[in-house]
Image (cartoon, rainbow, N blue to C red):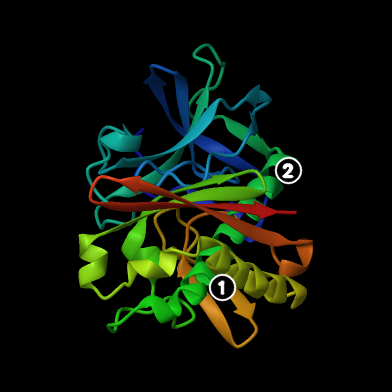
Amino acid sequence: MPVTSDTLVDYPAGATSSRGTVLATVPLDAGLGVVLDRTAFHAVDAGWPDQPADRGTLAGHPVLDAIVGATDGGEILIGGDIPVRTGTEGWSFVVVHVLAADAPVNVGDEVEVTVDEGYRRALSAGHTACHLASLALDAALADAWTKEVGGDALGNPDFESHASQSSRIHENGSVDVYRVGKSLRKRGFDVTALDDLGGVAERANARLARWVASDAGIRIDRDGDGLGDRRRWVCELPGGEAVIPCGGTHLTSLGEFASVTVALERADVEGGIAITMRTTAT
């Protein structure tokens, strides 16, 4: 049976269980890939693999992994084999749930998906904290720019966008790596601002404490229910609403945190400086 539409995803609304019909099964080196018409499972996207896949079960069988796949009506391509960006017209984007190779799941079966709620919440906390930390770092470095550059979701110079090398979400936190080299200096970033990383972290953490104390609400706005539809993280922060494109899962209020803090590390690398930001949420 060819797959001709996106998987409908329920996780942006916070769902941790769903029922769906098996549309396709795909033999994989890692096991059996199962595509449903609807799922509550968040899948890892090879294009920007910041948030890991959910854990849980499908029809009572452990889900070993969940990966974004795509098809133009023929073969279902997985992960890094996808040749187009998520949302590209003419392609369907699907969640491929990876089960054991001998799992007795067949096309046409109606199955239940159940997500590990504790693990989901811990990743959601980590992802929300990651967004807050990036905005707080941008604000802490706002005075380091000598030229006009694009602004972030709060209007501060977007260090995150210009310098980000990688971002990885984990349970109740994240690790972000930034690279500051010649291109960033040409854009007007004064690298001497990084000489006092302790001061940068102190300013960021002070802002994070104020934000957490505000109990600001969070929601996910989306253009549709399909995996390929655009989604945005929206947080009603003091002084302005922050909107960031995001396909991950999140908490619903900053009141769910006791604290969010960052620690910054510096390393010299070829052609520049690497800054690692470790974010911790409690």
- Whether residue 10 appears in this view of the structure is no
Amino acid type of the residue tagged 1 in the rendering: Val
Asked if the residue under mark 1 is in contact with the one under mark 2, i.e. CB atoms within 8 Å, the reply is no
Q: Residue furthest top?
A: 102
Place residue 207 in its image quadrant.
bottom right
- Whether residue 171 appears in this view of the structure is yes
Q: Which residue is mark 2?
A: 117
**Residue 80: image tag:** none
Q: Which residue is mark 1?
A: 234
Q: Is residue 130 left or right of residue 118?
A: left
**Residue 99, position in %: x, y?**
54, 22
Residue at 56% across, 68% down: 199
Residue at 30% across, 36% down: 80
**Residue 134, position in %: x, y?**
50, 64
Q: 249 above or below 18?
A: below
Relative to the observer, which residue lies in front, 122 or 114?
122
Relative to the observer, which residue lies in front, 242 or 164?
164
Residue at 56% across, 58% down: 130
Residue at 66% across, 36% down: 112
**Residue 235, position in %: x, y?**
60, 74
**Residue 149, position in %: x, y?**
30, 79
Relative to the observer, which residue lies in front, 270 or 230?
270
Q: Dot 1 lies on which element?
A: strand
Q: Is residue 174 left or right of residue 172?
A: left
User: Quadrant location of the C terminus?
Assistant: bottom right
Q: 108 above or below 177?
A: above
